[in-house]
Image (cartoon, grey):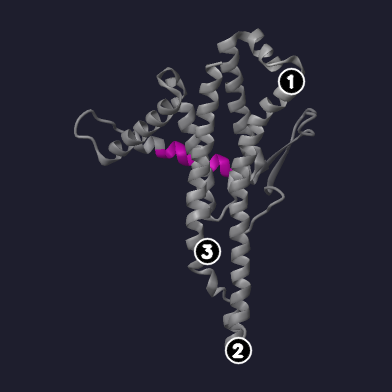
Amino acid sequence: MDINIVGPKVYWTIDLPFEVPLLGGKIEINETMVISWAVMLIITGLCIFLTHNLKVEKISKRQAIAEWLVELADNFTLGNMGPKFKQFIPFVTALFATSIFSNLIGLLGVRSPTADLNTEAAWAIVVFIMITHQKIKSSGFGGYLKGYTEPIAVMTPFNILSELATPIGMACRHFGNILSGLVINSLIYAALAAASAALFGLLPGVLGEVLSGIPFLDVGIPAVLSVYFDWFSGVMQAFIFCMLTTKYISNAAEG
């Protein structure tokens, strides 16, 4: 697996007819964007497939799976936030689905969008805006600003830093775990390939030259480790990110 730790590949660059300071007059279509679009298409296609031709009676296995997933989403969101937050069910569900598919798509040999900090940063900013909205809705704009001065005014800078730490912590936690798993898997593949070459290179003659070029040890062993680094860690990070989202938003509404 080819892992670019520095950043995603840039596929296309579009020159804008006007200067945009943050973009430098150009829009780059990179690997993260392309794979993210692919993830969204997969999720959209799956939703269309599961919700096609719904019935009230004698439902199909496909509809049963769709209803089971909807029930899981309802129970997760309402269980963490309460019945008055039922309007957040679609958002939390979409966030979880996008996260888990983005994490697991790396199994196909492409760079996971969540291995790019920009992805998690965008999610965290959206969540932060929703948290702030709930705080203002609960306490009013004046009460929201006053909260930064509690318990005493001198704590204002620290309260601001604490507020900013919420989206930064959410983004970095998710990103760090996904990227570290990719890097560890890459190192394991490289180490096993080198060990395989050294082991079979001990064989005499042409046989050793041929077999040393085939990474036999890469078969099987990384797959076992992938159960944790890709499957378990990917699902858990999606779960944790959504759990934090529901808790932060519900706590903000409580003032």
Which numbered dot is residue 155? Answer: 1
- Residue drawn at (58%, 22%), measured in percent from left and top? 131
- The kind of residue on which mark 3 rests is Pro
Is label 2 in a helix, a strand or a loop?
helix
Q: Residue 99: x and y, percent? A: 52, 40
How many angstroms separate mark 1 from mark 2 (CA)?
73 Å
By secondary structure, the bulk of the magenta-drawn segment is best described as helix
- The kind of residue on which mark 1 rests is Met
Is label 3 in a helix, a strand or a loop?
helix
Q: Which residues are magenta?
A: 33-46
Residue 118 is a magenta residue? no
Q: Residue 160: x and y, percent? A: 71, 23
- Residue drawn at (49%, 27%), measured in percent from left and top? 91
Residue hosting label 3: 222
Count of marks, rendered view: 3
Graded by Cα atoms within 10 Å as few (under 14), some (14 to 19) or many (20 or more), the crowding at tag 3 reads some
Query: Which image quarter is the C terminus in?
Result: top right
Task: Give above or below for 201 relative to 10.
Answer: below
Which numbered dot is residue 206? Answer: 2
CB-based contact (under 8 Å), mark 1 and mark 2: no
Q: Residue 84: x and y, percent? A: 43, 17
How many angstroms separate mark 3 from mark 1 (CA)?
50 Å
- Going from N to C along the chain, the mark reached first, 2 or 3, is 2
Task: Give above or below for 24 relative to 226.
Answer: above
- The kind of residue on which mark 2 rests is Val
Q: Residue 109: x and y, percent? A: 55, 56
